[in-house]
Image (cartoon, rainbow, N blue to C red):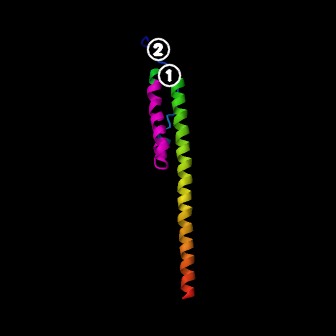
Amino acid sequence: MQPGYPSPQQPAVDNNMTMSIVAIFFFWPLAIPAIMSASRVNPLLQQGDINGAAQAAADSKKWSKLALIIGIVIWAVVLLCCLLGVVLNVGLFATSNSLS
C-alpha cells in the first residue's frame, strides 16, 4: 500500500461479547460457546475472513439468545415454585391455627 492512500475499511461485525457475558449469569453451559464464538470474531476480521467473522458472530448471538431464554425460563419457574410454596405454607399455617 502506498502512503497517502486510505486503507480499506474493515466492515463492522458485532461480536456480541456483551450479550455473551450477560448470558453467563443466566445459563452458563450455553454462554461458554457464545463467549468462545464471540472471541473468534475480531481475529477473523483481522485476517480478512469477513464471512468467517460473520458466521462466528451469528453463532455467538444464537448461543447467547438460547442461554438468555433458557435462563429466564428457569428463573421464572424457580420464582413461581417459591411463591407457590409460600402461598401453600401460609394457607396451611392459617388452616392449622383455625383448627386448634
Q: Where is residue 40 in the image (x, y as percent from the top left)?
A: 45, 30
Q: Which residue position is annotated with label 1?
A: 49
Residue at image coords 56%, 62%: 80
Looking at this view, is 22 or 9 the one in front? Answer: 22
Q: What is the three-letter code of the residue carrying label 2?
A: Tyr
Q: Does the magenta stretch include residue 40?
A: yes
Q: Which amino acid does label 1 sit on?
A: Asp
The residue wearing badge 2 is 5
Query: Which residue is located at x 52 percent, y 50 percent?
Result: 71
At 50% from the left and 24% from the top, the residue drawn is: 10
By secondary structure, the bulk of the magenta-drawn segment is best described as: helix
Give percent across and percent down for residue 24. 46, 46
Quarter of the image where one finds residue 77: bottom right
Residue in front for this viewpoint, 17 or 89: 89
For this orientation, the residue located farthest to the left is 3
What secondary structure is marked by label 2? loop
Q: Do the residues labelled 2 and 1 touch (CB within 8 Å)?
A: no
Q: In the rendered image of this protein, does residue 94 appear above or below residue 65?
A: below
SS category of the residue bearing label 1: loop
Q: Give the quadrant of the C terminus.
A: bottom right
Question: Residue 28 location in percent, x, y?
Answer: 46, 46
Q: Give the range drawn in magenta.
A: 20-45
